Image: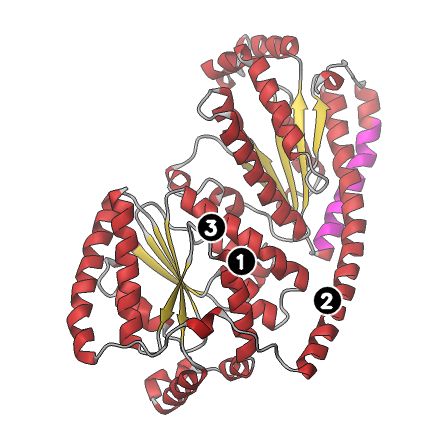
Amino acid sequence: MFQTAELGQALSKKEFKQQERVLRTHLLALQQEVRKRNQFPVLIDFAGVRGAGKGTSVNLLNKWMDARWIRTHAYDHPTDEESQRPAFWKFWRHLPPNGQIGIHMSGRYSRPLLDYVYGEINEFHFKRALRRINNFEKALADDGAMILKFWMHISKDVQKERLETLENDPLRKWRMSEIDWKHYEMYDRFIEAAEQIISVTNTGHAPWEIVEGQDYFYRSLRVGEIIQDRMERHLVSEEIRQKYLAEMRQRMEEKAETHENEGINTSLTIFDQVDLSKEITKKQYKKQLPVAQAQLANLHAQAVQKNISTILVFEGPDAAGKGGCIRQITEVLDARYFKVYPFSAPTEIERAHHYLWRFWSCIPMAGRMTIFDRSWYGRVLVERIEGFAGDDEWRRAFAEINDFEEQLIDSGIVLLKFWLQISKDEQLARFQSREEIEHKRWKLQDEDWRNRERWDEYNLAAHEMIQQTSVKDSPWILVENENKHFGRIQVLDAVCSALENALAD
């Protein structure tokens, strides 16, 4: 695979200078066009052989273009903050917004490559890690991102020469370490693993470009030319894609209006099987609540000591009782070790990123608990029903959400998803109660009444959501919350049970 990058291709300094001026002008103009359109981010990855020019190429790109709109991140050993979260947390956190360029060095491919070469993971887990990377890149590309990956290559002989030169240079010797010679001895193993990486992850939406790195002038110009070509192509293809999506979404809206005129599909949903008559008396509640809360406080304290993180997701119709359940949990916990995030419409900054970006930013550190009052499921609920997400966007979100939650669970996080269900009549009663009680009046918004008018649509969307995302390791817990006392105890018991299991494991 890498023989074509060991041909000794070179360029004279004069030729380089002549072409650099033109290339730099084009790249700068393309960068400004990407900024002006503000429709998609550009993500460029540099990986490859030590000494092949990754760092100098990145520095040159920052020089050629406007560095104010480039975000460069180089990854080394995980920081304490990173090691306490899922592996992809840092990559989501560092994603550039629409209109900007992100450059990653030793990024998402570095850890799987090193683990495989050192024998810390077998081929099955290596391929599994690459599949996860493919999912990550596909999610970004489907959202419009331009993704380009460079493998900078030099032969083993050239690498040896460069390491010896660096080692003998008193001004640059500090850049050397024992690991450089160790990796040189493992050169063939690294190349074998790199071939697998490129074979598995070289996709149309996130291609690899292998660049011969022996000659500074040749590789620099080659990297710049590839970026120029890809940016030109992506600007054109994104314009076409946006027109196609606009036409498709218009047709889907017209189709939805036709179905609306025909009447809502009244087929059974999973909520028709929920027994909303379940209840406990106020006396029983007052007796069970302090016991359940004391158990929760004890278990959470143990989870903090053992660095077990917890994420609780609360979804359900307006006035279903999410806030009340959350209060029953948090009032007995140490405030230093939990955080509640209420989510509504995304901000301007959040809209400039993939919809999952703002949720990845809230993943807790080890031993902490994070509670989401509404969550990433807004993509397949309110955004779907209200038309904020196109048919193409919410349909692919099911797979993206499953992959996201799989990563949380694989990293050791305890994940619980609660759907609180009430009847339409009970919702009306709670709305009216909020209107009458002054300190609750703020909770009732005009959009709550609008959403209520589309009750059946939301029910069908939630039914499909549960059908698509209630999987073995992260099932939905349906809570009968017509009687708030019954629902709150059910939630507390479920959280305690999950923490007990995690602590036992």
**Residue at 75 percent of width and 70 percent of height:** 250
Say what amino acid the circle numbered 2 marks.
Arg
Report, in whole angstroms, how far the alpha carbon at label 3 lies from the one at label 2.
Answer: 28 Å
| On screen, residue 442 above or below 399 | below
Report if the CB atoms under discs 3 and 1 are less than 8 Å apart. Answer: no
Residue bearing mark 1 = 468
Q: Quadrant of residue 464?
A: bottom right
Q: Which of pointers 3 and 2 lies earlier in the amino acid sequence?
A: 2
Say what amino acid the circle numbered 1 marks.
Gln
Q: Which of pointers 2 and 1 lies earlier in the amino acid sequence?
A: 2
Residue bearing mark 3 = 405
Q: Secondary structure at mark 2?
A: helix
* The N terminus sits in image quarter: top right
Q: Quadrant of residue 442?
A: bottom left
Range of the magenta residues? Answer: 18-36
Report if the CB atoms under discs 2 and 1 are less than 8 Å apart. Answer: no
Could you tell me residue 168's position as x and y percent?
Answer: 54, 7
Q: Is residue 28 magenta?
A: yes
Q: How packed is label 2: few (under 14 Cα within 10 Å), some, or many (20 or more)?
A: some
Report, in whole angstroms, how far the alpha carbon at label 2 lies from the one at label 1.
Answer: 22 Å
Q: Is residue 162 left or right of residue 370?
A: right
**Residue at 28 percent of width and 41 percent of height:** 505
| On screen, residue 397 above or below 49 | below
Q: Quadrant of residue 335?
A: bottom left
Mark linked to residue 249: 2
Q: Secondary structure at mark 3?
A: helix
Could you tell me residue 61's position as x and y percent?
Answer: 68, 35
